[in-house]
Amino acid sequence: MAANFVCPWSLVIPKRSQINYGIGMREVRFFSGLSVSAEATESTESPLLPPQSEADRGKLTLLLDLDETLVHSSVNKPKDKKPDLEVRIEGGIFYCFVRPKVSEFLRHLAKKNFEVAIFTSSTRDYAEQVIDFIDTEHIIKHKLFRESMAETSYGYHVFMVKDLATLGRDLNRLVLVDNSIFFFFLQPNNGIPIKSWLGYDLPDEDPLQDEELVQILPLLDELENVPDVRPLLKEKFNSEDQHKRILEEISEADR
Ligand SMILES: [Mg+2]
């Protein structure tokens, strides 16, 4: 592997002392030494997404995370398993496995009233190859990559988020499905946390038995029919309290 190789999903902000608490798998890292308050940003004048197309107007916008939500990639080639895709980017190859039922999941969304987009913390060169592979029917309308991530903080902890207020969509009708709960830290009631899928890197589980994607379809269908997704997601997941509880545990561990 080349010396300058950078993992496409690691979010390392240089020049700060870094503590990885392992929350949110590989994507979320915390940093110590900063003290600013957490608050959502205002909607930007230049939203990250273009206006909804004529065909998608009024549809619920569904953002899907990529790694550990729809696929799992590793630099280590499994000895006895053939990857679904080999992703070649500058400096390295990633062996990518697709989560079971991804095609079925996307096809269901296409049949219903969803504007489907990917919002990934991975780099564009890696993620575009993966998206092209899983989305043969062109159901995914928009793609947002690492450069669209924002930085925020809570107490002494600074971390990367997907700031949903910057997308140019009404938060009433916007949902993010992500295995990293902290990526919807700023808009906790717009997120659906999904169990991380780690392919064959979790040897004690059969990755092909995973049903998580199809299991959230009834909830997505329900959300598609409500004027504001947030009360329902707050009631179901209460992610804000989970965020606070985890951060308090981390702060306690820091002492
Ligand atoms: Mg992920």
Image: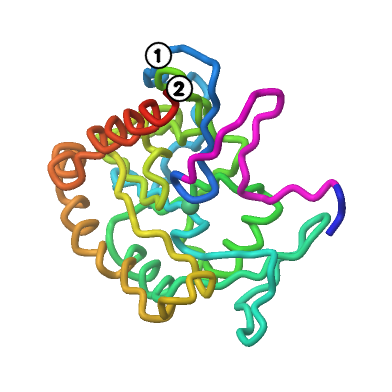
Q: Residue at x 31, y 41 (%)?
A: 174
Q: How is the image coloured?
A: rainbow
Magenta stretch secondary structure, dominant: loop
Q: Is residue 18 left or right of residue 30?
A: right
> Counting other residues with Cα less than 10 Å from the Cα at mark 1, is it few (<14), some (14-19), or many (20 or more)?
few
Residue 194 occupies which quadrant of the picture?
A: bottom left
Q: Nearer the viewer, residue 134 or 212?
A: 212
Q: Is residue 234 visible?
A: yes
The image position of residue 190, as x and y in percent, is 29, 39
CB atoms of marks 1 and 2 within 8 Å: yes
Decide which of tag 1 and tag 2 comes sooner along the chain.
1
Residue tagged 1: 37
Q: Residue at x 71, y 23 (%)?
A: 15
Kind of residue at badge 1: Ser
Mark carried by residue 153: 2
Q: Secondary structure at mark 2?
A: strand
Q: Which residues are magenta?
A: 4-22
The image position of residue 229, as x and y in percent, is 20, 41
Q: Is residue 168 visible?
A: no
Instruction: Please say if 174 is above or below 96.
Output: above
Q: Is residue 34 left or right of residue 180?
A: right
Instruction: Please say if 174 is above or below 194.
Output: above
Q: Secondary structure at mark 1?
A: loop
Q: Is residue 19 covered in magenta?
A: yes
The image position of residue 26, as x and y in percent, is 54, 49
Q: Residue at x 86, y 49 (%)?
A: 3
